[in-house]
């Protein structure tokens, strides 16, 4: 059976020929967004973890 467009995008960004629902993958991120409620909390935890910067600003 073929893949959905979402599965095709995830497969391409994970460097794989195919992905299936339920799999855990590591994929390249093009753009990350956050909302104004959770972003400050996430940034605080990011800094507490000792991170100084993101890998690809």
Image (cartoon, rainbow, N blue to C red):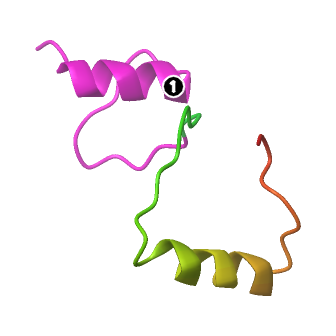
Against 21, residue 19 (above or below) is above
Image quarter hosting the N terminus: top left
Against 38, residue 18 (above or below) is above
Q: Whole-percent x and y of residue 24?
A: 41, 50
Q: Classify mark 1: helix, strand or loop.
A: helix
Against 41, residue 28 (above or below) is above
Please name the residue that numbered disc 1 is placed on.
13
Corner quadrant of residue 51: bottom right
Residue depicted at x 55% and y 43%? 26
Q: Whole-percent x and y of residue 23?
A: 34, 46
Image quarter hosting the C terminus: top right
Q: Which residues are magenta?
A: 1-26
Q: Residues within 10 Å of mark 1 (few under 14, many from 20)?
A: some
Prevailing SS of the magenta stretch: loop
28 part of magenta stretch: no
Residue depicted at x 39% and y 29%? 10
Against 50, residue 16 (above or below) is above
14 part of magenta stretch: yes
Count of marks placed on residues = 1
Q: Whole-percent x and y of residue 19?
A: 34, 29
Q: Is residue 42 left or right of residue 45?
A: left
Residue depicted at x 51% and y 25%? 13
Q: Is residue 29 left or right of residue 34?
A: right
Return the residue nearer the eye: 13 or 37.
Answer: 37
Return the residue nearer the eye: 37 or 6.
Answer: 37
Q: Residue furthest left?
A: 1
Q: Whole-percent x and y of residue 25?
A: 47, 43
Q: Residue furthest front?
A: 36
């Amino acid at each position: 059976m073929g893949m959905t467009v979402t599965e095709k995008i995830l497969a391409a960004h994970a460097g794989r020929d195919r992905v299936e629902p339920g799999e855990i993958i590591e994929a390249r991120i093009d753009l990350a967004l956050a909302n104004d409620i959770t972003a400050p909390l996430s940034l605080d935890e990011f800094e507490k973890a000792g991170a100084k910067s993101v890998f690809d600003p």
